[in-house]
């Protein structure tokens, strides 16, 4: 086997936010595997095969990519954002762990990218300027009780909180429940940002407060940032100072 | 005033990890302001002024950049990594808040970049594959009690924990104290990664466990990742599955 597999992220959307290392890895691949809309962001290369798939079934997609690499292909698995943050890298290593032992000898590497919360933060100022955490609200693979426990811990310890995967058609209620939980711990005037399609030409920001935040304004392409107690507005920007309340 | 100020991050080190948007912003600037080693990563542009400074005194550097922009210059403030994560963006907005009210009318924007924890994670697999948090161990601007409270909350809620600024000559003991605190909550076999100069040609990884982690092996250029209860090794990689323990 002299195939290889690289797991990349296209960044948040605009081509200008995809790293040159990722561009090079994509250009060298014989096969691209990924969710269709992410593959559409990759410029065409002659002779390259594209294996587009549904957004679910990540493990199946990872197995397909590993099988192609084991057959000698140079495969790139394409995520949005950074591949290591709520994206394909973990799914590939899960597939390695559960799959053909020969896959452990494959040449596999990960290229980092710009993940959605960094692009969302840059749209509004510097809301991630202090300690922060990132939580996926999808309970497809973990219990809602685990998510609640993490939200509560993050709020009580005054982290800035970035919420990924806030809502989908199959999961319309999670974000509203998360806001309700956070309102029980944090002040109503805490800044809340709903940033849709951050780092793309269609970026749209809703800057509101925890008391007024409306979960219905978020969809699958929205990244939510809930401020810490120190997060505040200056001019038209929102930022979190580097220090913390004692 | 028709000057402008853009706050950028060079990424973790290698030129191939700096986004094209950041490269373009740097090439258009008349003035670069930043810590010397970060400025050294920027390719030269004819006629551009470089204002290198010490790594401390971030607010002073931010004020200098704002004054240049107010005087009509096109200024780029240069951080490593992503400018919004434990870097210059928050310092610039602090300086705006405390400074000349005219600064609020300036054209200021932030370009996202690849922050150190993403590059560190990519070096070893996908350790940030689940919910995670990022904590700076520097107590220059927040109390050690605040840091301890956040470490404890993150450990109890089973986040993967990325530690920035683990140690400096002026603060040699923080990381050892953080490991001691985490050992009281988390299993000794929890994977711990000490990744020095991630995403650069000199990257070096120490993969160990919480029981055996040695704080003396970290310096200012080291990013630490402490796993969740599910983080594990497969082959030569370390990853955190997308799901969580119930």
Image (spheres, coloured by chain):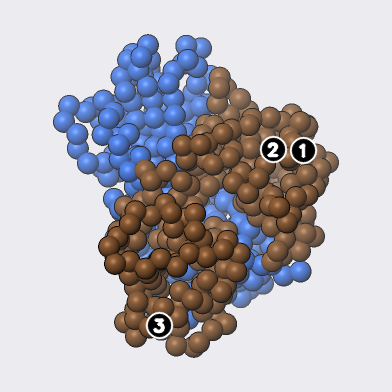
Chain colours: A brown, B blue
Which residue of the protein is positioned furthest toward the left in this rendering? B46
Q: Position of residue B180 (x, y in %)?
A: 62, 63
Of labels 2 and 3, earlier in sequence is: 3
Q: Chain of mark 3?
A: A
- In the picture, residue B49 is in which quadrant? top left
**Chain of the residue displaying label 1:** A
Q: Where residue A6 appears, x then y in whole percent?
A: 39, 68
Please say if the residues under marks 2 and 3 sit with CB atoms less than 8 Å apart: no
Is B112 situated left or right of B202 in this image? right
Chain letter for the residue marked with disc 2 in the picture: A
Query: Dot 3: what SS?
Result: helix
The residue to which callout 1 is attached is A186
Image vertical order of residue B40 relative to residue B154, above or below: above
Q: Quadrant of residue A229?
A: top right
**Residue depicted at x 38% and y 83%:** A71
Residue name at image x 76 percent, y 69 percent: B246
Residue B94 position (above or below residue B175): above
Check disc 2 and report the residue beneath it: A217
Spatial CA distance of label 2 from label 3 is 44 Å
Residue neighbourhood size for the residue with mark 2, other residues' Cα within 10 Å, grouped as few (<14), some (14–19), many (≥20): few
Which residue appears at 45% of the width and 77% of the height?
A66
A219 and A105: which one is in front? A219
Label 1 vs 2, first from the N-terminus: 1
């Amino acid at each position: 086997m002299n195939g290889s597999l690289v797991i990349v992220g296209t960044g948040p959307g605009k081509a200008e936010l995809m790293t040159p290392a990722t561009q090079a890895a994509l250009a060298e691949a014989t096969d691209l595997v990924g969710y269709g809309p992410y593959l559409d962001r990759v410029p065409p290369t002659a002779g390259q095969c594209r294996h587009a798939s549904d957004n679910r079934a990540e493990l199946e997609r990872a197995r397909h990519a590993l099988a192609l690499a084991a057959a000698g292909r140079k495969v790139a698995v394409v995520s949005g954002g950074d591949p290591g943050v709520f994206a394909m890298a973990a799914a590939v290593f899960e597939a390695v762990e559960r799959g053909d032992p020969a896959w452990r000898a494959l040449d596999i590497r990960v290229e980092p990218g710009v993940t959605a919360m960094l692009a969302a933060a840059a749209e509004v100022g510097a809301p991630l300027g202090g300690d922060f955490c990132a939580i996926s609200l999808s309970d497809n693979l973990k219990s809602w009780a685990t998510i609640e426990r993490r939200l509560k811990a993050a709020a009580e310890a005054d982290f800035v909180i970035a919420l990924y995967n806030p809502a989908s058609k199959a999961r319309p209620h999670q974000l509203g429940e998360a806001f309700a939980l956070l309102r029980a711990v944090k002040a109503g005037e805490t800044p809340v940002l709903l940033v849709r399609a951050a780092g793309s030409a269609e970026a749209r920001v809703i800057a509101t407060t925890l008391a007024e935040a409306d979960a219905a304004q978020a969809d699958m392409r929205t990244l939510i940032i809930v401020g810490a107690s120190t997060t505040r507005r200056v001019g038209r920007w929102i930022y979190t100072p580097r220090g913390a309340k004692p």
